Image (tube, rainbow, N blue to C red):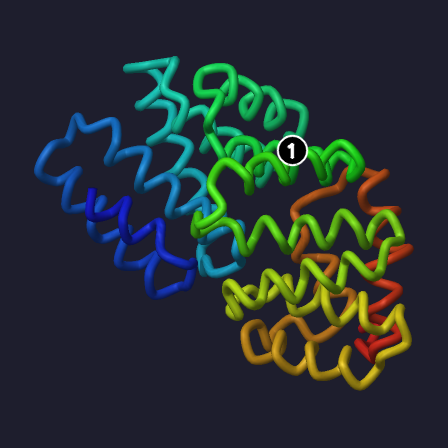
Amino acid sequence: MRGRALFNRPYSAATLREALLAYEQALEKDPESIEAKIGIASVLLTKVASAWSTSARQDAVQAEQLLLEALERNSNNAWARAMMGLLRRLQDRLTESRIEWETAIALDPNNATAFRQLGYTLMHLGLPEEAIPMIEKGIRLSPYDAGVPGAHQVLGTCHLLLGDLEHAVYFSKKSLGGNPRLYYTHTLLAAALALEGDLNGARTSLAEAAKIRPELSSLALMRASLPYTNPKYVALLEKTVFLGLHRAGVPEE
């Protein structure tokens, strides 16, 4: 329960470390605990998804093993299914990810995380129009959830992919109002502002992004950091996000 409470705080590298420690202590006391195993997997996968992991491949492998153990004990655990959906998306297995999220929702129709994350997977499948109502429903179900700032960021991304700059800027700023430590939101806002013609604002956002991930200093490095290869999604990114970042002054190499 302590791990879950820490995990439900606004995401940061520090709070995720604390949550992981609590879950590991729980698993040490009860090596058969399904909840502890899923909790550890959820922290590891959130670290990978948020670009805070320094060993992404190793974290994903450990998370998969823990989730498989949990699902072997209870294949109808909605939380485990939801986290498996996140893992499959991070592995770029998007169709499988979609199935896992839909299964989690069928098992728990009030699972706000599953609705939001189903929307994220739909976006990465190149379907931002279908993603938006799923994300909005997830936010309505749990408006004070620690994941809501990330949901606003993805909503902003969906609107930017659809060419709606006004809503892209609005949801990016709303995301940062809830959690200013999200790297991808700063880059999204920079891209949207640059496409609007506000280059000063875009460069300010890029400077904030650089404080969080200074190693991603070029478009080539940003592209290489993306785990998703769906052609439709990548094409939308190039026409919007990467075009905006180029106009904001991010070098190609």
Q: Is residue 202 above or below residue 39?
A: below
Q: Is residue 137 above or below residue 5?
A: above
Q: Is residue 209 above or below residue 61?
A: below
Badge 1 local density, few (<14 within 10 Å), some, or many (20+)? many
Quarter in which the C terminus is drawn: bottom right
Asked which secondary structure carries label 1, the reply is: helix
Q: At 66% across and 30% down in the image, what residue appears?
A: 94
Count how many numbered circles sit on residues in the image: 1
Where residue 192 appears, as percent x and y from the top left, is 81, 66
Q: Nearer the viewer, residue 94 or 182?
A: 182
Where residue 198 appears, as percent x and y from the top left, is 85, 79
Q: At 67% across and 62% down in the image, what residue appears?
A: 172
Does residue 28 appear left or right of residue 90 in this picture? left
Mark 1: amino acid: Met
Quarter in which the N terminus is drawn: top left
Does residue 72 appear left or right of residue 137 in this picture? left
Where residue 177 appears, as percent x and y from the top left, is 55, 67
Q: Splitting the image into 4 quarters, where does residue 67 fall?
A: top left
Where residue 71 appears, as percent x and y from the top left, is 36, 19
Does residue 146 appear left or right of residue 214 in this picture? left
Q: At 69% across and 77% down in the image, what residue appears?
A: 205
Q: Nearer the viewer, residue 138 or 26?
A: 138
Q: At 80% across and 86% down in the image, what residue appears?
A: 200
Q: Which residue is mark 1?
A: 134
Does residue 249 appear left or right of residue 84 in this picture? right
